[in-house]
Image: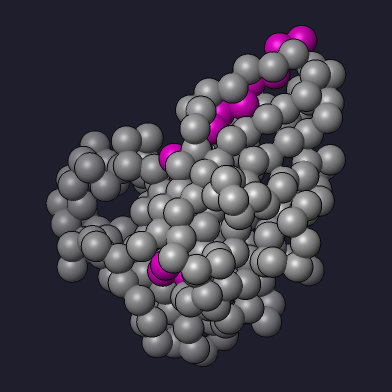
Amino acid sequence: AQSVTQLDSHVSVSEGTPVLLRCNYSSSYSPSLFWYVQHPNKGLQLLLKYTSAATLVKGINGFEAEFKKSETSFHLTKPSAHMSDAAEYFCVVSPYSSASKIIFGSGTRLSIRP
Amino acid sequence: KAGVTQTPRYLIKTRGQQVTLSCSPISGHRSVSWYQQTPGQGLQFLFEYFSETQRNKGNFPGRFSGRQFSNSRSEMNVSTLELGDSALYLCASSVTGDNSPLHFGNGTRLTVT
């Protein structure tokens, strides 16, 4: 069975400071892992994807995530937050099968303080 | 390349009515999946279509149905609307649906009064 847990429902950081959004997963085999971002009243946009090629994955807008198998984690980071990063972020786990098996985390709302 | 297009963006319906939502996938994408997003339940899978065939269905009542056309465009229909059907309905397309990234539309916001 697979599951994904986003450890924080809300994270607030100051502009220019680092961002850390935490995600733990559970899977009986090596899954594919994704981070998506959703701005208000918009669909989800793919930030980055891990598929076992490299443990450190670089995404769009300066985000990156590190896959740590020993910790079953896939945390999302960014060195310096920008006001435009304020949004909802979803960690997603997907086994090698159809879109119906994709499991979405509950989401982390990121707020940026000026 | 045009993204996933969902129409309409907003809908207001009355209980008991029915509604049809439309989704045009990215050109070349053959898999279309639908999700319901609500504050309480988060993102929940409705169904997936691939080459005009429903490949998988989530745990929703039979009032929720869908179809896919030969050009990969998809529609979903909800009959006998209930207040609890108020949600953001998201459509996503992917090349094959098997582990390829999902590309989402901006959704249709359905309000049932």
Residue A16 falls in image quadrant: top right
Q: Is residue B44 left or right of residue A22?
A: left
The residue at the far top in this view is A114
Residue for point 15% across, 51% down:
B16
Question: Nearest the camera: B33 or A53?
Answer: A53
Res. B24 in view: no
The percent position of residue A67, horizontal first and vertical second, equals 67, 52
The percent position of residue A63, horizontal first and vertical second, equals 78, 41
Task: Establish if B52 lies above or below B44.
Answer: below
The percent position of residue A21, horizontal first and vertical second, equals 62, 33
Residue for point 32% across, 36% down:
B40
Query: Which quarter shows the C terminus of chain A?
Result: top right
Task: Establish if B49 lies above or below A100.
Answer: below
Residue for point 44% across, 65% down:
A28
Q: Is residue B82 left or right of residue A114?
A: left
Question: Nearest the camera: B22 or A18?
Answer: A18
Q: Is residue B88 left or right of residue A111?
A: left
Magenta stretch holds residue A104: yes
Magenta span of residues: A99-114
Residue for point 59% across, 22% down:
A11
